[in-house]
Amino acid sequence: MNREAVNRKIRVGVLGFGGLGQAAARILTPKKEMLWVATADKGGYIYNQAGLNPDDTIATYGKKGSVGYVEPYGTISGDSIKDLIEIADVDGYFLALPNLPNTFMAEVARSFIQSGWRGVLVDALKRTSAMEQLLSLKEDLQKAGITYMTGCGATPGLLTAAATIAAQSFSEIHSVKITFGVGIANWEAYRATVREDIAHLPGYDVESACKMSDAEVEAFLETTGGILRLENMEHADDIMLELAGICDREQVSVGGLVDTRNPKKPISTNVKITGRTFEGKISTHTFTLGDETSMAANVCGPAFGYLKTAVSLHRRGIHGLLTAVEAMPQFVR
Amino acid sequence: MNREAVNRKIRVGVLGFGGLGQAAARILTPKKEMLWVATADKGGYIYNQAGLNPDDTIATYGKKGSVGYVEPYGTISGDSIKDLIEIADVDGYFLALPNLPNTFMAEVARSFIQSGWRGVLVDALKRTSAMEQLLSLKEDLQKAGITYMTGCGATPGLLTAAATIAAQSFSEIHSVKITFGVGIANWEAYRATVREDIAHLPGYDVESACKMSDAEVEAFLETTGGILRLENMEHADDIMLELAGICDREQVSVGGLVDTRNPKKPISTNVKITGRTFEGKISTHTFTLGDETSMAANVCGPAFGYLKTAVSLHRRGIHGLLTAVEAMPQFVR
């Protein structure tokens, strides 16, 4: 690799253009070290080597439902991700895709492997079972020359990495308890995310939540005053901390409170790490996020921090699958 | 490197046997993945390939003033570190050495470079100027095949790494404010550390604090009720966060309250990271350590977590100098 390749901006693609994908575009735009060049959604894709305009793209997506309609760089396609991979010169993709269906992230990873593309992939997936599917692709990703970092959002991601740092004070970890608070002014900006949350509630599963119409989601939220109270969620923080040898997955718990009608967080998002020190003392470290930081900031920020790290690893020839607790995220200027 | 080398315990040396060195020995003893095999202090060294006994070693050091007197593995030496490097088969050393004189850590690093030894070094140094000296050895360390991780204690170390994770939510960092509380029952168990703290006070410097007799330290502490109130300390957290591109060193501040007569912490140790999100919101993430965790647990735990990471890097052929915010510490079982 020549010096030019090292010094130029990292060319980033964002797959998915819902709430997270749009926030990702906004976050990338002022960055000196990264350039947003490509996006695909269900209906099409957009690509420009010199960079994309978030205002145009978000406005057109809002009006017409796909980035494929954006003039002059959009293309309508029924197989948008595959088509984009084939034509775009991208260093790394952030998979800002819906977590549902649960097999979707692994399917997309397989598309990248089959295409012969080499580079960096980063996801912000949530469910343990989705990460297990990716773990089974570890060797295939390595052979394909892809560096895939999984679980790089807020939780898993930011909070799991903080827990990994915190664990260092202890000889033995007893529990890692993640509690998140999310406030969104308008649930329709996060249609997929809200359905994912509903899928964690008693009486619902991934399939039934996925099938709900907007009217059904609306009716359901009416019964709870717009609040979703989530306990013992299936979250991949557990498998990540287990793989890192920090504790058993049963010692990790994730829960939260989502207010779908108020941008103010109903509680402060935090992770509490309890363990025993070498002197036999039991204690708890706490990492608390400022309430003014949005879900989008806490998910997309880490995702690009890990993307930068993954690009360094990829350039050093380190390929395969890594989780967010195996590498330090870098700061993207 | 064969499979046996990968699977066997990491053989660890601890240089220095004051409060930190002794805590390090206690922390290492129950570990399945590491084995404490060597230590050197001012008067001698001790080495046994099958592992050392912390009770014997601490008792003899307490009575006679050097691990060199421990039967049957101790050796009295006027050049203990150099002698130990020459004879001991060690994968990585934790430099639990006094931070004063300020040039000491870099001098020890030079001894390792000159000896032709290859392996891992980890320090828990504190001062920016001490880290700057090590940074000037970066290329020499790389050529020598040494992987040196610097700033791997509590602060810098644990708290700086937490700040690096926290920074991910923000587009721009405004301040990183570290405030530590330390409670020690008996200052004489941490003679060097207390002198280092005094050196940060107005009217003192490294040289004058270093020269103080125990009686002078005692008399000084009498005037403050045993409390040391520290502000705007020279701490290498600043240079580490600047090197990682997170903020300018002027935006980092370190202060604390040390009670030298009470094991209870006078305040909870914490780091506050304030920044601006991509949406323009100003917010603060906070990482707070449990009061029951001792300075020893918060310094030595991370040091060995980073030592484990450094051994992985060394085995991959990654040599040179890294700071604690460039790699994720691993958990040592």
Image (cartoon, coloured by chain):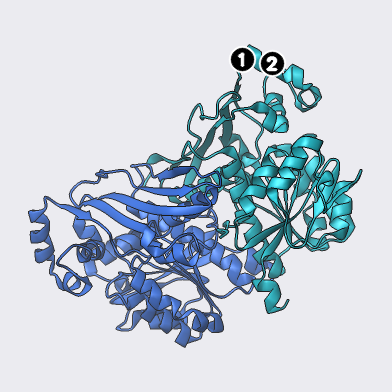
Chain colours: A cyan, B blue
> Which disc number belongs to residue A220?
2
Q: Name which quarter of the figure residue A283 lies in.
A: top left
In terms of secondary structure, where does tag 1 sit? Answer: loop
Q: Residue furthest top?
A: A223
| Apparent side of residue B191 relative to residue A64 in the rendered image (left or right) | left
Of the 4 image quadrants, the one containing the N terminus of chain B is bottom right
Asked whether the viewer can see residue B26, the reply is no
Q: Nearer the viewer, residue B182 or B297?
A: B182
Question: Which residue is disc 1 drawn over?
Answer: A224
Please name the amino acid that badge 2 sits on: Phe
Marks 1 and 2 share the same chain? yes
Counting other residues with Cα less than 10 Å from the Cα at mark 2, is it few (<14), some (14-19), or many (20 or more)? some
In this rendering, the answer to whether B209 lies above or below A51 is below
Residue sitting at 58 percent across and 38 percent down?
A295
Residue sitting at 84 percent across and 54 percent down?
A112
| Apparent side of residue B318 relative to residue B35 in the rendered image (left or right) | right
Residue sitting at 74 percent across and 46 percent down?
A57
| Apparent side of residue A87 relative to residue A25 in the rendered image (left or right) | right
Q: Position of residue B69 (x, y in %)?
A: 29, 72
In this rendering, the answer to whether A224 lies above or below B81 is above
- Dots 1, 2 in contact, CB < 8 A: yes
Pointer 1 chain? A
Q: Position of residue B330 (x, y in %)?
A: 55, 56
Q: Nearer the viewer, residue B236 or A137?
A: B236
What count of labels does the image hold? 2
Q: Position of residue B324 (x, y in %)?
A: 48, 62
Pointer 2 chain? A
